[in-house]
Image (spheres, rainbow, N blue to C red):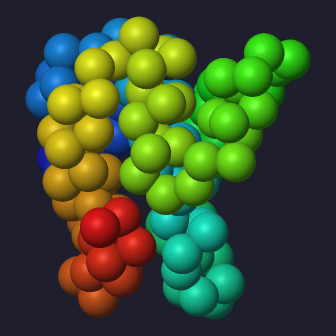
Amino acid sequence: DTKTKDAGNLVEDLMSETGVNKEQAMGGAGALFEMAEGKMDAGDYKEVANAVPDMQGYLDAVPSLGGSSMLSSAATSLTGMPKVQAQFDKLGIGADKVALFTPVVVNYVEKKGGKILGGKLLNALK
């Protein structure tokens, strides 16, 4: 069925484009969505969440940066890209891969929710 193929599967897209495993794909995408949620207008983010099947699954896959060491208390105060990089690191994904994840995630949201929504997400991930 070409329709479902076109819409793609975000996890499969990320695995093939960036060479990560399923858990890393879920957590990495979730980290980006979490960052976007903090930067986007609530209504726009809701549109993104509605465009992505199993958004909660992605968010649930994001590793917690909490803990008791001094480093993790610093990590919990991270926001934006430094936080995403710390989350990628915790997933065992090189921080350099963040740049590979972003266009795949944005492209996926664009296919599901349209170009305008993809653009808003891209702006939130800069």
As drawn, the residue found furthest toward the right would be: 68
* 17 vs 8: above or below: above
Which residue occupies 40% across, 73% down?
124
Q: Quadrant of residue 20?
A: top left
Question: Looking at the picture, how far across and down is residue 32, in whole percent?
Answer: 45, 50
The number of numbered discs placed on residues in the rendered structure image is 0
**Residue that appears at 19% across and 44% down:** 99
Task: Looking at the picture, tell me which residue is in the foreground, 16 or 99.
Answer: 99
Residue 94 shown left or right of residue 65 in the figure: left
In which quadrant is the N terminus drawn?
top left
Q: Is residue 102 left or right of residue 69?
A: left
Would you identify the image quadrant in which residue 44 lies? bottom right
Question: Residue 84 location in percent, x, y?
Answer: 46, 42
Residue at image location 64% in from the left, 35% down from the top: 75
Left or right, 64 with respect to 37, comes to right
- Specify whether residue 28 is in view: no
Instruction: Judge from the rendering whether residue 124 lies leftward or rightward of residue 12; answer left or right.
Output: right
84 to 79, vertically: above or below? above
Q: Nearer the viewer, residue 34 or 54?
A: 34
Compared to 13, does 80 lie above or below?
A: below
At which x and y percent is residue 111?
Answer: 25, 65
Residue 91, percent across and down? 48, 16
